[in-house]
Image (tube, rainbow, N blue to C red):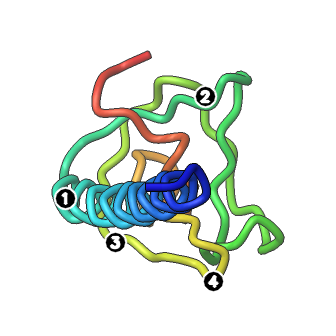
């Protein structure tokens, strides 16, 4: 085979691998979201406060702020148009939506 043909095959193989990786990550993310429904999890934002919103959207109204490590129960999940996952959580003092990336299964 020529160098051009081999290069083209490597490019096609690489692109196919990237597509499969993206699909796998998407499926795993959805599976994790469903697995933690009704489970106790912990807020883990690196700053001292975690913000609960009234909608699964960063620009929605802020309902409450909770300290890092606060235990919450996940009641619902939602995916936004930009591919972010959000959880509707209940804490002892407030309930609202938090970005999934700020939720851990273990206390921080």
93 to the left or right of 36: right
Q: How many residues crowd around disc 3 within 10 Å: few (fewer than 14), some, or many (20 or more)?
A: some
Q: CA distance from mark 1 to mark 2?
A: 21 Å
SS state under label 2 = strand
Which residue carries the number 2 mark? 67
Q: CA distance from mark 4 to mark 2?
A: 28 Å
SS state under label 3 = strand
Expressed as whole percent of the image width and height from the top left, the position of residue 28 reads: 27, 56
Q: How many residues crowd around disc 1 within 10 Å: few (fewer than 14), some, or many (20 or more)?
A: some
Q: CA distance from mark 4 to mark 3?
A: 17 Å
Which callout, 1 or 2, points to the residue nearer the camera? 1
Expressed as whole percent of the image width and height from the top left, the position of residue 104 reads: 38, 33
Which residue carries the number 1 mark? 38
| Relative to 71, residue 26 above or below | below
- Residue at 76% across, 62% down: 62
SS state under label 4 = loop
Which callout, 1 or 4, points to the residue nearer the camera? 4
42 to the left or right of 37: right
Which residue carries the number 3 mark? 76
| Relative to 57, residue 46 above or below | above
Which residue carries the number 4 mark? 81
């Amino acid at each position: 085979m020529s160098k051009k043909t081999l290069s083209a095959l490597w490019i096609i193989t690489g692109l196919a691998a990237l597509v499969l990786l993206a699909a796998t990550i998407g499926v795993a993310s959805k599976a994790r979201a469903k697995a933690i429904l009704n489970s106790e999890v912990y807020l883990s934002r690196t700053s001292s406060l975690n913000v609960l919103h009234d909608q699964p959207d960063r620009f929605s109204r802020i309902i409450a702020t909770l300290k890092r490590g606060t235990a919450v129960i996940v009641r619902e999940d939602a995916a936004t148009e930009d591919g972010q996952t959000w959880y509707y959580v209940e804490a002892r003092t407030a309930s609202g939506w938090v970005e999934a990336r700020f939720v851990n299964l273990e206390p921080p």
